[in-house]
């Protein structure tokens, strides 16, 4: 029996729960640390306690999936605000060398972010000075990198010089020095790959862009990967909160000796070439990395495989991509360069051929494309898909739906194993409820129509948290009744884990019956 250890990026459900839920669909067990060892947003995890947990449990483990940001800094947000020295960072990551020495056969799949540069003026997840200088620091990084790579036009030079005068030197120095330490750790981890301590490494790019600190550091890492001749062991691509799912899928494929072949089809001709919002490369390039990271491979023809990944994509890019806004306010390309009707007909056709059809809904940021979801509902297709995701960034969505697709396809609808099938459908329904129900419908309703009455806002709900959570739960239940024809679907224990409106946690249960007609074998 393979023992698989997992140290998540942070304590939120997407990192702590999603990979475990995926593991429950299989005959493998994913072992995670007790929640009490993890932190809470800006409060770092108990790093020494996690080190002890790893040393105790990894000596007889076959695999370790590990977030180096958690191992070293205590989580994703602490990685942005820590005051550790370079030496302290390296000493903490060296526990992986110790684990490898104690258990030479263990395979360690690690991921370590390039420190993000947020473009907004909020200090919720950043250093305190971001409240006043966040966007200026982002622009400073953009212009610094652009000047070095191709020069600045006169207007940009004026803006650049003004930023140098405006941003307090102590704040900029603090930000840059922390980046230097995090960059040094990233390069040290590459050497660990070259020396064989790490089996594979993924460097996710969190909220990145064409120019800036992240773009510059990514290029330097790529050059170092080439120098160390480890490009067959390292992937660098946009993502963050999806890596736990992707790497569990990778381990699953390794254990099962499974090489899933996936055919990809888009809703827009331009879709694969567009750069998604918060990312630095075309959608299809990211998708290729996501599929490889999860253990799969893109195949040329739909008739050669049973796995069809339908990608609902925008036909515009970056800041023109829609958020959760009214349909008639979207960019014009959503009306002329995305063929929803043909996309639906293609889904019907593939389902009619008995294919496992999954949907990556990345045309709209931070939630489902409600226009598409309503079309799926009208065509009675909601219950026919194998897997679905449509949350936050393109990378987050792809890194959730692809692992589920791979696992679902391996078990071929689970045959007579109704317990596993129920778990599989629960994971699918959870994504529908959260990505479509909450992020696509309920969240904006509450923000616009209820929070002002409660004298609360998107990031300020602590004083009415329980009241807001009850409101979210009631509205999600209302959404389920109106949109998901599932008998006895229960939504309970809704909570807002970081005391904001961005993400939710909840429990979901339902009675397995003929609702999922195409997925249950008599």
Image (cartoon, grey):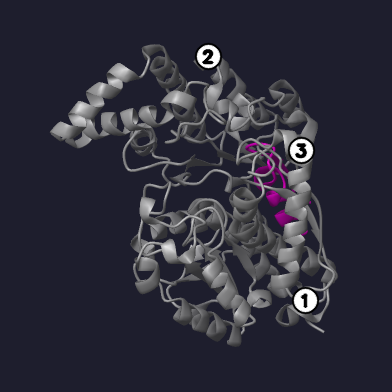
Q: Which residue is mark 1?
A: 415
- Residues at discs 1 and 3 in contact (Cβ within 8 Å): no
Label of residue 85 in the image: 2
Label of residue 60 in the image: 3
Secondary structure beneath disc 1?
loop
- Side of 262 where 248 appears, left or right: right
**From the viewer's perspective, is residue 92 above or below residue 365?**
above
Badge nearest the viewer, 2 or 3: 2
- Side of 459 where 291 appears, left or right: left
Percent x, y of residue 420: 80, 65
**From the viewer's perspective, is residue 505 above or below residue 481?**
above
Please indicate, yes or no, whether residue 30 appears anywhere in the rendered image: no
Real-space Cα distance between discs 1 and 3? 32 Å
Residue 7 lies within the magenta run: yes
Percent x, y of residue 453: 67, 44
Secondary structure beneath disc 3?
loop
Residue 393 lies within the magenta run: no
**From the viewer's perspective, is residue 310 above or below residue 156?**
below
Badge nearest the viewer, 2 or 1: 2
Answer with mark 1 or mark 3, whichever residue precedes in sequence.
3
Where does the magenta region start and end?
1-28
Location of the C terminus by quadrant is bottom right
């Amino acid at each position: 029996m393979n023992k698989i250890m997992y140290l998540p990026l942070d304590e939120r459900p997407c990192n702590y729960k999603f990979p475990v839920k995926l593991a429950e669909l299989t005959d493998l067990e994913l072992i995670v640390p007790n929640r009490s060892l993890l932190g809470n947003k800006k409060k770092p995890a108990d790093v020494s306690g996690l080190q002890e947990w790893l040393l105790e449990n990894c000596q007889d483990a076959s695999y370790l999936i590990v977030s180096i940001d958690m191992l070293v800094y205590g989580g994703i947000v602490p990685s942005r605000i820590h005051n550790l020295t370079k030496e302290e960072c390296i000493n903490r990551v060296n526990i992986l060398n110790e684990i490898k020495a104690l258990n030479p056969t263990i395979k360690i799949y690690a991921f370590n972010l390039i420190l993000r540069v947020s473009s907004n003026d909020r200090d919720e997840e950043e250093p305190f000075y971001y409240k006043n200088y966040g966007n200026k620091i982002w622009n400073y990084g953009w212009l610094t990198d652009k000047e070095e790579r191709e020069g600045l036009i006169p207007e940009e030079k004026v803006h650049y010089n003004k930023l140098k005068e405006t941003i307090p030197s102590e704040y900029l120095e603090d930000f840059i020095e922390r980046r230097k330490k995090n960059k040094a750790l990233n390069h040290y981890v590459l050497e660990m790959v070259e020396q064989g301590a790490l089996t594979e490494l993924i460097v996710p790019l969190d909220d990145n862009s064409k120019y800036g600190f992240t773009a510059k550091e990514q290029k330097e890492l790529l050059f170092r990967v080439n120098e160390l001749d480890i490009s067959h062991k390292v992937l660098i691509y946009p993502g963050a909160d999806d890596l736990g799912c992707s790497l569990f899928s990778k381990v699953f494929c390794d254990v099962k000796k499974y090489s899933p072949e996936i055919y990809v089809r888009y809703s827009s001709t331009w879709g694969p070439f567009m750069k998604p919002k918060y990312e630095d490369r075309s959608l299809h390039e990211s998708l290729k990395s996501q599929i490889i990271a999860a253990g799969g491979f893109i195949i040329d023809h739909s008739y050669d495989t049973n796995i069809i990944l339908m990608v609902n994509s925008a036909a515009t890019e970056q800041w023109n991509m829609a958020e959760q806004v009214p349909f008639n306010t979207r960019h014009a390309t959503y009306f002329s360069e995305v063929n929803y009707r043909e996309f639906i007909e293609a889904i019907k056709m593939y389902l009619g051929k008995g294919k496992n059809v999954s949907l990556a809904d990345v045309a709209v940021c931070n939630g489902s494309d409600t226009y598409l979801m309503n079309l799926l509902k009208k065509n009675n297709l909601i219950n026919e898909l194998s897997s679905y995701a449509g949350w936050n960034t393109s990378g987050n969505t792809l890194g959730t739906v692809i692992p589920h697709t791979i696992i679902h396809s391996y078990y071929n609808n689970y045959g007579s194993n109704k317990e596993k099938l129920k778990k599989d459908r629960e994971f699918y329904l959870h994504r529908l409820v959260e990505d479509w129900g909450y992020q696509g419908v309920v969240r904006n309703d509450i923000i616009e129509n209820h929070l002002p009455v409660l004298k609360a806002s998107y990031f300020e709900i602590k004083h009415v948290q329980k009241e807001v959570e009850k409101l979210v739960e009631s509205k999600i239940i209302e959404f389920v009744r109106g949109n998901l024809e599932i008998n006895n679907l229960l939504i309970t224990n809704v909570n807002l884990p970081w005391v904001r409106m961005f993400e939710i946690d909840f429990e979901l249960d339902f009675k397995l019956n003929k609702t999922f007609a195409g997925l249950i074998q008599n």
